[in-house]
Amino acid sequence: MKRFDILIKNGTIIEGTGLPRFQGDIGIKNGHITKIGKIDPSHAQRVLDAQGLIVAPGFVDLHTHYDAQVHWDPYCSISSWHGVTSVAIGNCGFGFAPAKPEMRERLFRMMTRTEQVPYECMIAGIGLDWDWETLPEWMDHLDRIPKGVNVLNYVPLNPLLVYVMGLERAKAGATATPAEIRELKRLVNEAMDAGMMGLGVQRLGVHSLQADFDGTPMPTDVMPDETLLEIASVLAERGEGFIEIINAQHGNPLTNGDPRDQQFVEKLAAVAKRPILYNVVTALDDHPTSHLDQIKWLHDCNARGLRIFGQGLTVRSPFQFTLEDWNLYDSSPAWNYATQGTTAERLVKLADPEVRKRMIAEDESLITLGVGGPIAGVKVQVTPDHPELAKYHGRTIGEIAAAEGKHPVEAMLDIGVAGELKVLYRTQDIASSDPVKMGELCRDQHVIPGISDGGAHTKFFTGGSYTTDLITWLVRDTGQMTLEDAHFHLSYLPAQAAGFVDRGFLREGAPADIIVYDLANLRRVPEVDYEIAHDFPAGEWRRIQRAEGYRWIMVNGVVTFEDGVCTDATPGHLIRLNQWDRPAQTAAA
């Protein structure tokens, strides 16, 4: 019997912790790294020649929405195509457990507008005959299904609130009774005993950017502060867990927003006594110092003992959308109303002069919360089946509006309605494309790059390519980061912050989640725009970006992709945290 199942030979090893690179070999046996050093190739069953290639830990993505997609796509693409070997789901408080049988369809609906996961996909890919109700049963369900990546799960607070308080009271932002608080805390304890990693929550207020299918806010958007603080106290009592939160009830977090939003996050960190992943920090072209202000705040919090990390929006990607599907202006009540309903219903409303007046009258800052900048900067990209609109191709809405003497909203809607809502628009890149600014953000020790939103917004966005983009753009092409620093931020830091401390680095004894890539030829494909793939259940389509340059991607010691081709192996694990003996948790805990 060979000593190693796989030997990675002659690679340049970036081990993930920030230590300098070195040349060496990695021997893998039974899914783990068993030796790093010089290894005789005759001792291995299979040898992968990594001469001239980078060998690094697989990327860790803490912000995805693959809760549905993992059921029909074990690899959670596009993330897995771009070197991600571990994903966290349950982000922003969205998920499918706990769920009473009569709420199953409603939880599907809750994912359709806010995360743009098509209802028909979920019906075809998951169905309504669930084998779970409770959070521990959901974890067992995830354990059973094939996975090509490792999966972790936050406790999603939207279904939790609905389960305990009922749909109407939860969505009304009702104050939980003492009995309901005890039950919420009991269920969180039960979930974490089953290995869940902490709490995922979105708090975007009454005019939520990510609204429910009917345009109303989500339960967590309007939940009272004290309810969330009570739930978070469970983590302090346990001394474990992690909280992912987007908190923007009063302002735009990308520009440091309203101090009340950050002050609440500080209070949450003080109550939970556990790390917080704060969404969103980024660099913006029209706010030159906002990223520096955000970094300063993170440093100040940590200096005071509040472990708050910033989740960085770092990928150079626009939104590409049509008014047939678009919903990310939902924080504007007028846009929310106008973009509800079927295509026919939207056409009527978007052509209505009175509706347009309301859309124009509202403060445009309501619709620029990280969604590609002002409407004037949006470009007309494609006008299918309408040659009379071809004159607008490649022009911005601002240019068209000025030429035609119209308000930008009116110009955009005139073109969209004339094109039967199938006109394709392209925003500016969501974050700054200035490498100096983004380098300042991504090098900071308190920033975790990401916000892939993998599995969500699939008709608009391909944020799952952020790993490849960061390595090529900020390391190879502009030198704003070293490879050592990039892999620290993309693998080691997120894993350690989230609490799965045996991954995110290359070390003897660690699980063999490894990527081997050609730095010189690494790239996103296509680089600028997106490809359309018809690969979802029920004939649904999505926008994708593939990757080139990854020679091998390995999960738990098994190759899942070789030169971009899937091997069909499903070695991914459900990562259960907090698994050790402890006294039984009580309802009063």
Image (tube, rainbow, N blue to C red):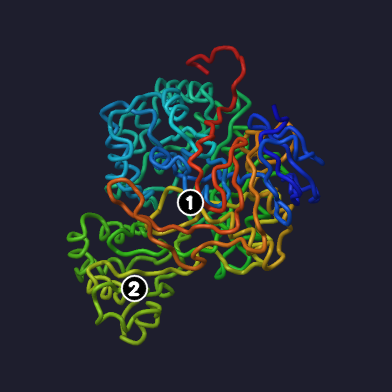
Left or right relative to 72: residue 50: right
Quadrant in the picture for residue 98: top left
Mark 2 surroundings within 10 Å by alpha-carbon count, few (fewer than 14), some (14 through 19), many (20 or more): some
Q: What residue type is labelled 1?
A: Ile
Q: How crowded is mark 1: few (under 14 residues within 10 Å), some or many (20 or more)?
A: many
Q: Residue furthest top?
A: 583
Find the distance from the CA under tag 2 to the CA under tag 1: 24 Å
Vertical arrangement, residue 99 with respect to residue 490, above or below: above
- Measuring 56% from the left and 45% from the top, which residue is drawn there? 61
- Residue at x 55%, y 47% (from the top left corner): 561
Front label number (2 vs 1): 1
Q: Looking at this view, is 146 or 297 the one in front?
A: 146
What x and y, as percent, mark residue 129? 28, 28
Q: Is mark 1 on a helix, strand or loop?
A: loop
- Going 35% across and 32% down the picture, which residue do you hit? 162
Q: Name the residue under label 1.
A: 78
On screen, 222 above or below 402? above
Residue 231 at what x, y percent from top left?
A: 50, 29
Residue 317 vs 380, above or below: the answer is: above
The reply to whether dot 2 and dot 1 touch (C-beta < 8 Å) is no
Frontmost residue, 294 versus 121: 121
Please tell me whether residue 343 is drawn above or below residue 248 in the rendered image: below
Residue at image mark 2: 382
Query: Which quarter of the picture shows residue 134?
Result: top left
Of the image marks 2 and 1, the number of the one nearer the N terminus: 1
In the image, residue 269 lies at what x, y percent?
60, 38
Image point (51%, 53%), residue name = 464
**Depth check: 266 or 44 in front?**
44
Residue 300 makes an appearance in the image: no
